[in-house]
Amino acid sequence: MVEATSRHWLRDREGDESAEVTYVELFFDLVFVFAITQLSHYLIDNLTAEGAMRALLLFLAVWWVWIYTSWVTNWLDPERTPVRLLIFALMLAGLMMSIALPGAFEDRGLAFALAYVAMQVGRSFFMVWALILARHDGRINFQRVAVWLLLSGAFWIAGAFAEGDARFGLWTLAVGIELLSPSIGFWLPGLGRASPEDWDVEGPHFAERCGLFIIIALGESLLLTGATLEEHEFTPANLAGLVAALATAVTMWWIYFDTGARRGERALERSETPGRLAQIAYTYLHMPIVAGIVVTAVGDEKVLADPLGVSDWGVAATILGGPALFLLGNLLFKMAVAGRLPLSHLAGLVVLLALALAPWVVEPLLLSWGSTVALLVVAALEWRLARSRTAAAAKVT
């Protein structure tokens, strides 16, 4: 790419040190603690097949607006006043989006859509302007992005004026456009498509940003667990559920951060096309990881509310489906960054599948502990295999 001028709003990438995550970026993330909480409560209140599909669509919107902002702040310097003002404006819109989220398919659809589209389109045009000021040829890429987001935005707004299945259909189309466009390089007639080399990223910064979102999701799961138990009497059963919920959160942290996060960061640093790897491993493959944490939190709430009740399909789907989504996402992520299949994750998925064969004969508490044990087995196997590879490498050298 053409070098930027000395007066610009972009991060300085000329030094050897990697860009640090700034305090204003962490401040921005606080809005998404609220958004994830709203998603969890929406799924709890709408635990049906239709509710799950709607919750998935809303989750994709929340993730997509956050990850696009992380891409932008990977280039922009949040220490510059105009960039900070952009982030504060995005926080306001994000707060409105989060407030409207539970009523997005009811009377707050327009508020949700307007806030979402304002974030996506407004941020993209700001980026185009910043790159024009910097005389940076990357502006063409963000012109492509802005056009695609204007297209999806039209369906978001149109869906807000529709109702029921029509709204769901139009918003699904909007999300589909946003999910598809990066994979085809934001191709446009006359402008062509972006190449992987165009999307250069500061690898450690990008990996850290995504890791922090995992922390947000895990933190929200603990908040939901604590708030749920506060509303019920302490009994041996729901205290056992609390221990299972905490053990699950800790094990999820271990599975992602003990090896996966570091491998991802190293892979981005070494990759000849870090933009492509960031797109695959982080933009797309982190979605099931985060979704799995959110669904697991809903399952924990169901266990704490009625630990010795009946494990109907909805309860079982959250208790087992959340960890399964999390493991599947981690399996694909680690394959993308390490180039090999993590057999420990495959073993965990097999255990969860076995538990799913007859959930109705198992109480929610026992089902929860079963899924926790599956995750613990995965963490232990991966830890053992990682240490074995380290020891073998040491002997070779």
Image (cartoon, rainbow, N blue to C red):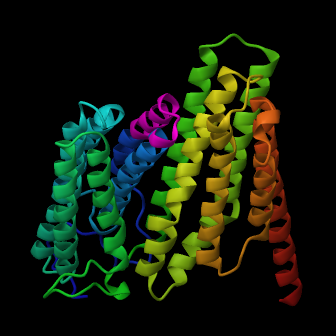
Count of numbered circles on the image: 0
Picture layout, residue 142 above or below residue 215? below
**Magenta segment main secondary structure:** helix
Quarter location, residue 123: bottom left
Residue 258 in view here: yes
Q: Is residue 186 within the magenta segment?
A: no
Quarter occupied by residue 312: top right
Instruction: Between residue 397 and residue 28, name the one nearer to us.
Output: 28
- For this orientation, the residue located farthest to the top is 233
| Residue 13 located left or right of residue 82 | right
Image quarter where the C terminus lies is: bottom right
Quarter of the rendering containing residue 103: top left
Of residue 22 and residue 214, the one placed in the foreground of this image is 214
Q: Which residues are magenta?
A: 33-50
Q: Is residue 84 left or right of residue 326?
A: left
Question: In the image shown, does 43 or 342 lie closer to the viewer?
Answer: 43
Instruction: Report x, y in % for residue 179.
Output: 36, 66
Name above or below for residue 204 compared with residue 208: below
Quadrant assignment for the N terminus? bottom left
Residue at x-position 79% and y-position 26%: 240
Residue 84 in sight: no
Residue 171 x/y as whole percent: 29, 52
Please tell me which residue is depicted at 17% across the width and 49% down the height of the picture: 157
Q: Position of residue 289 (x, y in %)?
A: 57, 56
User: Looking at the picture, does residue 362 appear above or below residue 142?
Assistant: above
Lateral position of residue 3 relative to residue 334, left or right: left
Q: Position of residue 146 (x, y in %)?
A: 18, 67
**Residue drawn at point x = 48 percent, y = 51 percent:** 213
Residue 34 inside the magenta-drawn segment: yes
Q: Residue furthest front?
A: 165
